[in-house]
Amino acid sequence: MINKRLLIRNLLSHTDENSFYDKKQKLSLEHKEGKAKFLKHICALSNSNPENNAYIIVGIEDTANKVIGVDFFDDSKIQNLVNAYLLNPPKITYENIPFPRLPRHKVVGLVTIYPNKNITSLIKNVWKYHKGIIFYRRGSNSIPVQQNFEIKNNNTQIVLAIEKVAQNNIELTLDGTFEFFNNHSLYTPKYKVFGEQFVLCWAGEKKRNEGKIFYSRVDIELINEQVRLFFSALDDVQISVNKSSFIITEFIHLGIGNKKKYYALEKTIINFKNNGKYSITKKLLFKPLQFNPKVIEEIAHENHYLLNKIEKNQLLSSLEEQLITRLPTNYLLCYLSGISDTTIQLKKAKNYFRNLEDTSTYVKYKEVLRIIRKVKYA
């Protein structure tokens, strides 16, 4: 079992970018250029490593090789993106790896590209890259190659050696468990051992609402691999545990004015198997909202008015400054009620939210985009 934090440290310490490893400050999959470059690197790393894993580390400042982290990324549809654009797509995973000294909401992203003995190429145009193009790694560069390209196995021994050094042990597991408990002392941290192999820790602020128990500010980590499996900055979740599974049901608290209720968003089942493996299954539970269309139109109009003032750098009244804090969730309400251009409008206010002295509105903004992404790509 590989300790992913140790693996990342070994890659950063002992190797520069090469034909089996790349590093990025961030991924921009919502933009055509960012999506295309990500697919290019997946294609190139897959073709260059037919017998071994290849990796992309996200959240690294390239020049100084410094760990700066990125936001927790829970988009389980990233494999669908690869499948949609690549012929003979490799299996990939995106994992969130917590690192000491990073803020609680930051992690390092680890993309693992698993071995694929078939030649991978684009099956459709994306940005400036054309259908049929094949990419390969030459050193730290992903470059196009001729159609008569032949796969060669060059990296197996060195990658296996790096992975072997990153194997987990009892000391790392205990250190990771104590680290989790120390970092989450305010939220009653707990742990459970599954299958006599996996140590899972979780913590959250317990609350009771509508006669049911919920947890907010939830953090769940698989200690053996140093992988963060779930993270919530705002929404509420219910947790249930049995002998072989850990189940998280995620809710969003929405409504108009003071009339709010919980809406089930997604269920995540982490199932631990007896063969030393585990699987994560996600099921979207959300159903379209049924609010008065006229009220939603009024909220959308208010959103547009505030956004227009922000874009023009106009002075806001004290009441409007208070309304701004509700802007992200009001946009979410509009989106879930069928107003499709919500995401485009909301992103126009990104820099304004980010520069506010109170960071809670910017956190709401990022959480709203995360929820929209889940619903959109379900």
Image (cartoon, rainbow, N blue to C red):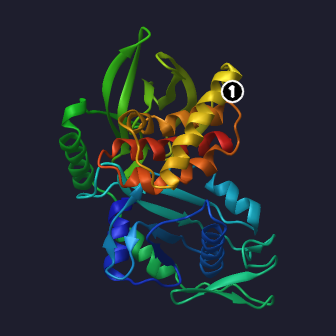
Q: Which residue is mark 1?
A: 288
For residue 345, above or below residue 155: above
Residue extending furthest toward the top: 211
Q: Quadrant of residue 86?
A: bottom right
Please tell me which residue lies in front, 200 or 77: 77
Figure disc tally: 1
Which is nearer the eye, 225 or 372?
372
Place of residue 195 in the rendered image (x, y in percent of width and height, measured from the top left): 42, 37
Which of the pair 223/272 is nearer the observer? 223
Give left or right: position of 139 versus 225: right
Which quadrant of the figure contains the C terminus?
A: top right
266 vs 365, left or right, is: right
Identified at 35% across, 76% down, the residue is: 12
Q: Residue at x 46, y 62 (%)?
A: 110
Give how far across and how far down residue 204 sits, in percent: 32, 31
- Residue 275: percent from the left, percent from the top? 50, 45
Residue 137 on image: x %, y %: 59, 85
Q: Residue at x 28, y 53 (%)?
A: 103
In the figure, 301 relative to 28: above or below? above
The answer to whether residue 283 shows anywhere in this view is no
Residue 342 in view, yes or no:
yes
Q: Nearer the viewer, residue 20 or 238?
A: 238
Please rate how many residues cluster around mark 1, counting C-alpha atoms within 10 Å: few if below 14, some from 14 to 19, many from 20. few
- Horizontal side of residue 65 vs 120, given as left or right: left
Q: Quadrant of the N terminus?
A: bottom left
Q: Quadrant of residue 292?
A: top right
Q: Amino acid at mark 1?
A: Pro
Query: Circle 1 — which element?
Result: loop
Compared with 330, 229 (above or below) is below
Q: Quadrant of residue 355 in the image?
A: bottom left
